[in-house]
Amino acid sequence: MSIESTNPATGEVVDTFDETSSGDREAHLDRAVETFEEWSETPIERRQRLLSAAADVLRENSAEYAELMTKEMGKPIGQARDEVEKCAWVCDYYAEHAAEHLDDEVIASEPEARTLLSYEPLGPILAIMPWNFPFWQVFRFAAPNLAAGNVGLLKHASNVPGCARAIEDVFREAGFPEGAFTTLLISSSEIDEVIEDDRIAGVTITGSDGAGRSVAETAGSQLKKNVLELGGSDPFVVLEDAPMEKTVETAVQARLINNGQSCIAAKRFVVVDEVYDEFLERFVEEMDAQTVGDPMDEETDIGPQAREDLAEELHEQVEKTLEAGGECRLGGEPMDRDGAFYPPTVLTDVPEDAPADQEELFGPVATVFRVPDEEAAIEKANDTRFGLGASVWTEDLERGERVARQFESGLAFVNELVKSDPRLPFGGVKDSGYGRELARDGIREFVNRKTIWVQ
Ligand code: NDP
């Protein structure tokens, strides 16, 4: 069987790949176990050096990888180059900090006993990854885990097989041993079998909450450690003392980055009554000023949605929201051109329980809510089953921090858009999943935190 990747801007086939056969899958799993035996014993300094080499490979081939991402899933080319650079950064980060994050933690010294925690790798880890940041999502898993002494197997989203292969090549070219990082081009129907396989020690998924539930169920039945990075419907709270120009500018960016397809994009804009009209007017104006077009064009702000079916699903959510009584202030109709394009869209007066209120809208659609005051803003911000990120905008930093502490989310930002950063733990609560990636927390997810008592 073969897998095709399709350019969502043109509908043209980018490339065709052979699926991994069941025989090859077996061989890859065997190899992963063998490599783990040797890799987990390799001094961490060497593992860190190889990550540095991976950062070099990424930077050397940045233009090529960026073009591949843009062709397979439609992100604007400048953002694709930034993504490659961020991948190099996460490799550099763990090349520098892995050893210190995994150092033994002495709990008590003698006289009665010396007790400590040591962090030991678990084995081959399966990573199920999405198409929206086809390089970044993979590297933020791979860099800490390879540094920790685990080996990785990647089941990438079916629409980005070229990226999956290219990432495997990055590690090969950097000098990692064969089997340290392997791509399996398999369909999602084969995933349960892989999770259940004794050779797999743990599993991580970034994707929809539906896929997350399925993975967690299978992993749970096998008592295997799992990390879930799922969707979000992040609130962006604007208080009456928000610095309006910067707030609006960032609001647009926070909604439209990656063609609106980010788990931590701001999706629900919760604005207090006093500044609602001013915010809405400026926000609609700025959203309207964005250039939608060919993602290979440097001037383009918004490319196509990653697949036709995703653009259709998004439009259905918009239509249902309008049927329920919502108002459309901008966009709201698929564009009259080839490709999976959807225009910047702004919805208001959205009733409770309408899709734009309760579901994740994974595209350039913003919903703006009017609330009387700060207390109501926090309540509205938390009125969602998701809990990934949230931001609040105010000139008063103490107030901002107080509000941030009341968000039911894994990430809370004051006067900045929610973003991931190798130095900071990243993850959610509620239906956004559990576990953390990045920083010290991320490298300690798939390790045995072994308690040692020496008397
Ligand atoms: P999915 O969650 O279906 O895909 C993400 C990954 O999970 C892919 O590798 C996919 O493989 C795999 N997968 C799908 N179903 C299962 C399953 N039952 N068990 C195990 N793995 C599975 O996302 P979609 O591409 O369908 O996008 C749908 C929605 O998901 C978006 O509109 C958005 O709301 C959310 N999403 C969230 C992301 C995030 O960053 N949190 C990223 C992507 C999507 P395959 O491609 O082969 O189906």
Image (cartoon, helix red, strand yellow):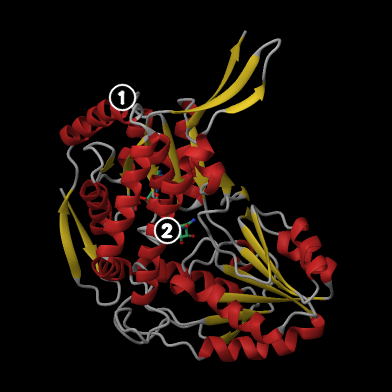
Of 420 and 206, the residue lying toward us = 420
Residue 436 visible in rendering: no
Residue 21 visible in rendering: yes
Classify 74 as above or below 108: below
Q: Which residue is mark 1?
A: 37
- Looking at the picture, which amino acid does disc 2 mark? Trp
Of 348 and 216, the residue lying toward us = 216
- The image quarter in which residue 201 lies: top left
- The image quarter in which residue 389 lies: bottom right
Residue 297, horizontal then vertical, whole percent = 31, 84
For the image, the number of numbered tags is 2
* SS state under label 1: helix
* SS state under label 2: helix
- Give the residue at x 42% y 79%: 342
Classify 151 as above or below 3: above
Classify 82 as above or below 245: above
Left or right: residue 175 versus residue 314 is left
Crowd around label 2: few <14 · some 14–19 · many ≥20 (10 Å)? many
Please identify the quadrant where the C terminus is shown.
top right
Left or right: residue 324 versus residue 96 is right
- Give the residue at x 56% y 52%: 426
- Give the residue at x 77% y 67%: 400
Which residue is the extreme one toward the top?
A: 455
Q: Which residue is mark 2?
A: 89
